[in-house]
Amino acid sequence: MLSPKNQKFREGVQVPFLEKMLKENQKELEQLVNSFDETTGKQQERLHAIEKTSKVKSNIVEITKAIEYSKKMEYFRHPNIPQNISDEHIWNDAWYDEKRNAWVTLNDYFFQLENSRTRGIQIKYETENITNVGIIIEEKKIEFRYGLPSMLQKDDKGQPIWYSLSTLYDVMLTKEIVKGTLKPESQENAYLYTAGSEAWISVLGRHLTEQEYLFACEFMIGLVKTPLNVLRANVGRSYDPKEYKKTMKQWDKENKELEQQQKKKK
């Protein structure tokens, strides 16, 4: 698993690549709209044009979100990514291979998928790359969701769900991404990813990373937010003694005030 130490590079590095992609989709949409009248009386062609137009519009929305996401998030360059791949094509351990018009990932999840290493495109890719081999995926199978290159998969119930091509560390998570995993409002909003940061906080039968926990406290009913320093101290992890002492002092004060209020009510 990639260690983020000394691997960080600036926010917004992928913007030029995304803006180019956005312009290509906008141009394609314009062409589709201009040629739509040509499908009059041709039912199958019109249905195909409508479907394609809808997809391109969706791409424009998602790529626009990806541009804004990229401007705010820190990214890492996995040390095993080929040197000839520019930073603007990289999302941690996943990247766009311009030469092959395909995406490649070192994300552990994709190596475990059935037939991931026996597909024709993969076999060809591996014959051309002796070391640091990743899983190559056709460009048409990758779309942007929550600002990230993602691939449509199936969850444990067999329902379609988007999965992040890149491993995500705490500095890249948003409330929406975490909610998409822990408590999506609908199947359409569901989202999965491989966490790069250590998941050590036990919550409702699963373990969360620190940032996942902080976001979960915002939308999961009944989940009481406990300061990370307290959680760390309780399990013997490294913590800030000054902050811990300050928190405990505040809690003691609040408990005494609560006790006094309860006595007055009696």
Image (cartoon, rainbow, N blue to C red):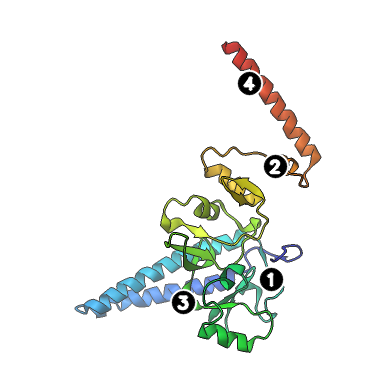
Tell us which disc is closer to us: 2 or 4: 2
Task: Determine whether the residue tagged by mark 3 lies in a helix, strand or loop.
Answer: helix
Circle 1 Cα neighbour tier, 10 Å, few/some/many (<14 / 14–19 / ≥20): many
Q: CA distance from mark 4 to mark 3?
A: 59 Å
Pointer 3: residues within 10 angstroms few (<14), some, or many (20+)?
few
Query: Given contact means CB atoms under 8 Å apart, are the residues at marks 2 and 1 in contact?
Result: no
Mark 3 or mark 2: whose residue is earlier in sequence = 3
> What's the mark number on residue 140?
3
- At x 53%, y 84%, the residue is 121
At label 2, counting other C-alpha atoms closer than 10 Å, the crowd grade (few under 14, some 14-19, many 20 or more) is some
Q: Which residue is mark 2?
A: 231
Mark 1 residue element:
loop
Which residue is identified by label 1? 78
Is 131 situated left or right of 164 in this image?
right
Q: Are marks 1 and 3 in contact (CB under 8 Å)?
A: no
Check whether the beta carbons of the residues at disc 3 and disc 2 lie within 8 A of each other: no
For the N terminus, the image quarter is bottom right
